Amino acid sequence: MTEHRLRIDPADRPRATILIVPPLFDEANRLRRTLLLAMRALAWEGFAAVLPDLPGQNESLVALETVALDDWQDALAEIAADLPGPVVIASIRGGALIDHGAKAAAWWRLAAVSGSSLMRTMMRARVAADREAGLTSSLESLQAAAQVAPLLLAGNALSPAMVAALGEAEAQPVQPLRSIALGTDGLAGTPLWLRAEPGEDAAMARAIAADIVAWSMACGIN
Amino acid sequence: MTEASSVDATLRALLADILGLGEERAAALTEDSGLFGALPEFDSMAVATVLTEMEDRLGIIIDDDEIDGEIFETYGNLLAFSLRKVTD
């Protein structure tokens, strides 16, 4: 099944297509508005920008509990192969865990995070929510339960395969890659993906677009 | 900066990032400022995010069984817990 792709095109023939790999789970919602602003800024610079839904996420009709981490990697590879080149992959946070199976002219990663860190946060949210509901659970008991049945974490039903793969997932080497963090040595902005309530940051969106454009040009894309 | 004031600054920045407090509200937090139950943004997901970010930014490991409700009751409690972890 083809998933929805949000695409913003420049006025003229695109210099390249930027394939945006969003953060995973709720972090994608918190950053979505700012990512869209960055996509508009990219279009202004002559780049097409594509933000695909991963199977089981956003508008997808696939049940998340049937999805494994590899499926996301494969889906991105298919999408990248389908786009007119050159393709530059821009991944944020957990998106960096699934962007290495696709073929691209260059990769750009913002604030890449390990799968174990994402899992730990979601497991802790479940433990805290259980405690409020008068139930007792722990990271260990949830991990054990996740081996045999889908585990509900912060609204996401994750398959045993997904829990196992995500817990060990690290961003893989790709070439050429620019990996950038937030902060004084990196990109100016705030970690909106951590924010309890969605916000937006137009200045950060412009900084994201400018950095992707500069890196694309450094990789020979004109 | 002393270690205590650096932990304090890190903690305020982290709460500002996660709860969207803005610099002014984060700077205005006192020992008695209520967190969980007092700030509507401070839900169970925010608690979990705070713990993981504390680990990353303060370079500490937090065990499940070290966490009780009291830690998140006030800013002072959270700061005291963080200082204890950092000096451990």
Image (tube, coloured by chain):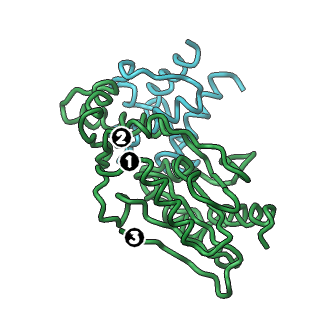
Left or right: where A1 falls relative to B15: left
**Disc 1 is attached to a residue of which chain?**
A
Q: Are marks 1 and 2 in contact (CB under 8 Å)?
A: yes
A162 and B7: which is toward the camera: A162
Q: Residue A197 at x, y = what percent?
A: 42, 54
Q: Are marks 2 and 3 in contact (CB under 8 Å)?
A: no
The label on residue A68 is: 1
Q: Residue at 55% of width from left, 12% of height from top? A: B88
Mark 1, Cα crowd under 10 Å, few <14 / some 14-19 / many 20+, is many
Quadrant position of residue A35? bottom right
Q: Residue A90 at x, y = what percent?
A: 62, 59
Above or below, comparing residue A134 to residue A182 in the picture: above
What is the three-letter code of the residue carrying label 3?
A: Thr
Quadrant position of residue B5? top right
Query: In the rendered picture, chain A carries what hue?
Result: green
Mark 2 sits on what residue?
A: A161
